Protein backbone atom coordinates (compact mmCIF):
# COMPACT_ATOMS: atom_id res chain seq x y z
CA UNK A 1 0.00 0.00 0.00
CA UNK A 2 3.03 2.25 0.27
CA UNK A 3 2.78 3.21 -3.42
CA UNK A 4 -0.87 4.25 -3.04
CA UNK A 5 -0.90 6.09 0.25
CA UNK A 6 1.40 8.52 1.94
CA UNK A 7 2.39 7.78 5.48
CA UNK A 8 2.82 10.84 7.65
CA UNK A 9 3.18 11.48 11.34
CA UNK A 10 1.27 13.99 13.41
CA UNK A 11 2.69 14.18 16.89
CA UNK A 12 2.95 10.58 18.08
CA UNK A 13 0.17 9.26 15.79
CA UNK A 14 0.93 7.84 12.34
CA UNK A 15 -1.58 8.89 9.66
CA UNK A 16 -2.17 7.13 6.36
CA UNK A 17 -3.51 9.76 3.98
CA UNK A 18 -4.32 9.42 0.25
CA UNK A 19 -1.87 10.83 -2.20
CA UNK A 20 -3.18 14.24 -3.42
CA UNK A 21 -4.75 14.49 -6.85
CA UNK A 22 -4.59 17.54 -9.09
CA UNK A 23 -7.33 18.88 -11.36
CA UNK A 24 -8.04 21.04 -14.36
CA UNK A 25 -9.98 23.58 -12.33
CA UNK A 26 -10.86 26.03 -15.12
CA UNK A 27 -14.56 25.71 -16.06
CA UNK A 28 -15.55 25.42 -19.72
CA UNK A 29 -17.26 28.72 -20.50
CA UNK A 30 -16.85 28.99 -24.27
CA UNK A 31 -18.38 27.12 -27.19
CA UNK A 32 -18.16 27.63 -30.94
CA UNK A 33 -20.38 30.71 -31.08
CA UNK A 34 -21.11 31.78 -27.51
CA UNK A 35 -19.09 32.33 -24.37
CA UNK A 36 -19.98 33.18 -20.78
CA UNK A 37 -18.10 35.76 -18.76
CA UNK A 38 -18.63 37.10 -15.24
CA UNK A 39 -20.61 40.31 -14.89
CA UNK A 40 -18.48 43.43 -14.45
CA UNK A 41 -19.54 46.90 -13.40
CA UNK A 42 -18.81 48.08 -16.92
CA UNK A 43 -21.63 45.76 -18.11
CA UNK A 44 -24.28 47.65 -16.13
CA UNK A 45 -25.26 50.08 -18.94
CA UNK A 46 -25.81 47.15 -21.32
CA UNK A 47 -27.81 45.22 -18.71
CA UNK A 48 -29.97 48.26 -17.96
CA UNK A 49 -30.79 48.73 -21.65
CA UNK A 50 -31.36 44.99 -22.10
CA UNK A 51 -33.98 44.79 -19.36
CA UNK A 52 -36.01 47.75 -20.65
CA UNK A 53 -36.04 46.60 -24.28
CA UNK A 54 -39.70 46.75 -25.43
CA UNK A 55 -39.75 43.00 -26.17
CA UNK A 56 -38.39 42.26 -22.68
CA UNK A 57 -40.55 44.57 -20.58
CA UNK A 58 -43.20 41.91 -19.89
CA UNK A 59 -41.13 38.78 -20.46
CA UNK A 60 -38.51 39.58 -17.80
CA UNK A 61 -38.81 39.67 -14.01
CA UNK A 62 -40.32 43.15 -13.79
CA UNK A 63 -43.43 42.07 -15.71
CA UNK A 64 -44.19 45.41 -17.31
CA UNK A 65 -43.13 47.69 -14.47
CA UNK A 66 -40.37 50.23 -15.10
CA UNK A 67 -38.06 50.35 -12.08
CA UNK A 68 -35.43 53.04 -11.84
CA UNK A 69 -31.88 52.31 -13.01
CA UNK A 70 -30.81 52.29 -9.37
CA UNK A 71 -33.44 49.66 -8.53
CA UNK A 72 -32.42 47.49 -11.47
CA UNK A 73 -28.77 47.50 -10.39
CA UNK A 74 -29.79 46.82 -6.77
CA UNK A 75 -31.89 43.78 -7.74
CA UNK A 76 -29.35 42.49 -10.26
CA UNK A 77 -27.70 40.31 -7.58
CA UNK A 78 -30.78 39.54 -5.47
CA UNK A 79 -30.99 35.79 -4.66
CA UNK A 80 -28.34 35.11 -7.32
CA UNK A 81 -25.91 32.20 -6.93
CA UNK A 82 -24.06 32.71 -10.22
CA UNK A 83 -24.65 34.75 -13.34
CA UNK A 84 -22.79 35.47 -16.56
CA UNK A 85 -23.01 37.82 -19.47
CA UNK A 86 -23.60 35.90 -22.70
CA UNK A 87 -21.24 37.18 -25.40
CA UNK A 88 -20.36 36.24 -28.96
CA UNK A 89 -17.06 34.42 -29.40
CA UNK A 90 -16.09 36.23 -32.60
CA UNK A 91 -16.39 39.87 -31.47
CA UNK A 92 -17.26 39.66 -27.74
CA UNK A 93 -20.55 41.51 -28.31
CA UNK A 94 -22.73 41.07 -25.19
CA UNK A 95 -26.13 39.71 -26.12
CA UNK A 96 -27.72 38.58 -22.85
CA UNK A 97 -27.59 37.53 -19.22
CA UNK A 98 -28.03 34.04 -17.76
CA UNK A 99 -28.68 33.51 -14.06
CA UNK A 100 -28.82 30.74 -11.47
CA UNK A 101 -30.91 31.89 -8.51
CA UNK A 102 -32.85 30.73 -5.45
CA UNK A 103 -30.60 27.71 -4.77
CA UNK A 104 -31.77 25.08 -2.29
CA UNK A 105 -28.70 23.07 -1.33
CA UNK A 106 -30.56 20.88 1.15
CA UNK A 107 -32.89 19.51 -1.52
CA UNK A 108 -30.54 19.90 -4.46
CA UNK A 109 -32.19 22.28 -6.89
CA UNK A 110 -31.99 25.84 -8.19
CA UNK A 111 -33.64 28.02 -10.82
CA UNK A 112 -32.38 29.34 -14.14
CA UNK A 113 -33.42 32.52 -15.94
CA UNK A 114 -32.15 34.17 -19.10
CA UNK A 115 -32.71 37.45 -20.92
CA UNK A 116 -31.29 38.21 -24.37
CA UNK A 117 -31.43 40.79 -27.11
CA UNK A 118 -34.60 40.12 -29.15
CA UNK A 119 -32.75 39.68 -32.44
CA UNK A 120 -30.89 36.66 -31.02
CA UNK A 121 -33.92 35.05 -29.41
CA UNK A 122 -34.40 31.98 -31.56
CA UNK A 123 -30.87 31.43 -32.84
CA UNK A 124 -29.18 28.13 -32.08
CA UNK A 125 -26.40 30.11 -30.46
CA UNK A 126 -28.57 30.81 -27.43
CA UNK A 127 -29.09 27.12 -26.75
CA UNK A 128 -25.31 26.67 -26.77
CA UNK A 129 -25.07 29.35 -24.06
CA UNK A 130 -27.70 27.52 -21.97
CA UNK A 131 -25.78 24.25 -22.39
CA UNK A 132 -22.56 25.92 -21.22
CA UNK A 133 -24.33 27.32 -18.18
CA UNK A 134 -26.04 24.05 -17.24
CA UNK A 135 -22.66 22.32 -17.47
CA UNK A 136 -21.19 24.91 -15.14
CA UNK A 137 -24.01 24.75 -12.59
CA UNK A 138 -24.25 20.95 -12.48
CA UNK A 139 -20.49 20.52 -12.27
CA UNK A 140 -19.83 23.30 -9.77
CA UNK A 141 -22.72 23.00 -7.33
CA UNK A 142 -23.95 19.42 -7.71
CA UNK A 143 -27.68 20.15 -8.02
CA UNK A 144 -30.09 17.33 -8.94
CA UNK A 145 -32.40 19.58 -10.92
CA UNK A 146 -32.46 22.99 -12.51
CA UNK A 147 -35.89 24.55 -12.83
CA UNK A 148 -37.11 27.11 -15.37
CA UNK A 149 -40.32 29.09 -14.78
CA UNK A 150 -41.81 30.39 -18.02
CA UNK A 151 -44.95 32.23 -19.00
CA UNK A 152 -47.04 30.64 -21.71
CA UNK A 153 -46.02 32.97 -24.54
CA UNK A 154 -42.34 32.35 -23.72
CA UNK A 155 -42.79 28.61 -23.38
CA UNK A 156 -44.56 28.36 -26.75
CA UNK A 157 -41.25 29.11 -28.48
CA UNK A 158 -39.43 26.10 -26.99
CA UNK A 159 -42.32 23.69 -26.34
CA UNK A 160 -41.01 21.26 -28.98
CA UNK A 161 -38.10 20.46 -26.65
CA UNK A 162 -40.33 18.91 -23.97
CA UNK A 163 -39.29 15.35 -23.18
CA UNK A 164 -35.92 15.66 -24.90
CA UNK A 165 -34.26 18.86 -23.65
CA UNK A 166 -36.37 19.28 -20.51
CA UNK A 167 -39.41 17.98 -18.64
CA UNK A 168 -42.62 19.86 -17.88
CA UNK A 169 -43.27 19.38 -14.16
CA UNK A 170 -46.12 21.81 -13.50
CA UNK A 171 -48.55 24.27 -15.08
CA UNK A 172 -50.22 27.05 -13.12
CA UNK A 173 -53.30 27.82 -15.20
CA UNK A 174 -54.28 31.43 -15.89
CA UNK A 175 -51.53 32.43 -13.48
CA UNK A 176 -50.67 35.95 -14.67
CA UNK A 177 -52.42 38.74 -16.56
CA UNK A 178 -50.53 40.43 -19.40
CA UNK A 179 -51.42 42.01 -22.72
CA UNK A 180 -55.12 41.92 -21.85
CA UNK A 181 -55.18 38.13 -21.33
CA UNK A 182 -54.48 35.57 -18.65
CA UNK A 183 -51.57 33.22 -19.24
CA UNK A 184 -50.40 29.89 -17.85
CA UNK A 185 -47.03 29.59 -16.13
CA UNK A 186 -45.00 26.43 -16.77
CA UNK A 187 -42.32 24.90 -14.56
CA UNK A 188 -39.70 23.06 -16.60
CA UNK A 189 -36.80 21.02 -15.29
CA UNK A 190 -33.52 19.58 -16.49
CA UNK A 191 -32.19 16.59 -14.53
CA UNK A 192 -28.57 16.12 -13.66
CA UNK A 193 -28.59 12.35 -14.31
CA UNK A 194 -29.96 12.88 -17.84
CA UNK A 195 -27.85 15.88 -18.75
CA UNK A 196 -24.67 14.11 -20.01
CA UNK A 197 -26.67 12.13 -22.59
CA UNK A 198 -28.64 15.23 -23.63
CA UNK A 199 -25.42 17.21 -24.04
CA UNK A 200 -23.77 14.45 -26.08
CA UNK A 201 -26.80 14.28 -28.38
CA UNK A 202 -27.28 17.98 -29.09
CA UNK A 203 -23.92 19.62 -28.30
CA UNK A 204 -21.22 16.94 -28.57
CA UNK A 205 -18.52 19.60 -29.04
CA UNK A 206 -19.12 20.67 -25.42
CA UNK A 207 -18.54 17.18 -23.99
CA UNK A 208 -15.19 16.89 -22.26
CA UNK A 209 -13.43 13.70 -23.25
CA UNK A 210 -10.73 14.00 -20.62
CA UNK A 211 -11.15 13.55 -16.89
CA UNK A 212 -10.97 16.82 -14.96
CA UNK A 213 -9.37 14.97 -12.03
CA UNK A 214 -5.74 14.02 -12.47
CA UNK A 215 -4.79 10.84 -10.59
CA UNK A 216 -2.13 10.84 -7.95
CA UNK A 217 1.30 9.68 -9.01
CA UNK A 218 2.68 6.98 -6.68
CA UNK A 219 5.77 8.05 -4.83
CA UNK A 220 7.76 6.75 -1.94
CA UNK A 221 7.29 9.03 1.01
CA UNK A 222 9.24 8.56 4.16
CA UNK A 223 7.36 9.24 7.37
CA UNK A 224 8.00 12.77 8.54
CA UNK A 225 10.63 13.02 11.20
CA UNK A 226 9.39 13.89 14.67
CA UNK A 227 12.81 14.96 15.90
Image: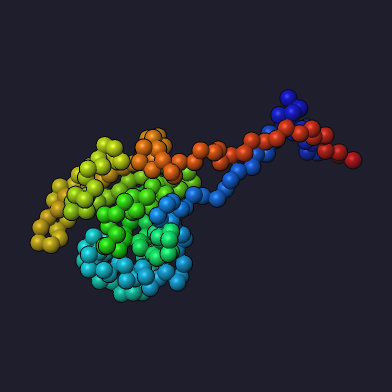
Observer able to see residue 217: yes
Q: Is residue 57 left or right of residue 128?
A: left
Q: Name the residue rendered at 60%, 43% in the picture.
A: 23
Q: Nearer the viewer, residue 86 or 224?
A: 86
**On screen, 14 above or below 41?**
above
Q: Residue lying at the far front in this picture: please name it.
A: 90
In this rendering, is residue 207 above or below 174? Answer: above
Q: Position of residue 204 (x, y in %)?
A: 41, 40
Residue 146: give x, y in percent of width and height: 36, 45
Q: Position of residue 171 (x, y in %)?
A: 20, 44
Q: On the rendered image, what quadrant is the N terminus found in?
A: top right
Residue 53 found in image quarter: bottom left
Residue at the right extreme? 227
**What residue is rendered at 33% in x and 50% in y?**
127
Give the side of residue 86 with respect to residue 224, left or right. Answer: left
> Is the C terminus in the top left, top right, bottom left or bottom right quadrant?
top right
Residue reaching furthest to the left: 180
Q: Identify the residue at horizontal 22%, vertical 53% (top origin).
A: 154
Amino acid sequence: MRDERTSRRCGTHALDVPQPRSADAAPVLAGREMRLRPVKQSDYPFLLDLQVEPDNLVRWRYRGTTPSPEQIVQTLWQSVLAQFVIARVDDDEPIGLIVCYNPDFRHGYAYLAMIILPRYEMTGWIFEAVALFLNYVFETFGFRKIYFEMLEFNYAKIASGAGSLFHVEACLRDHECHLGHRWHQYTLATYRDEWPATLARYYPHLVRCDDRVKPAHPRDYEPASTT
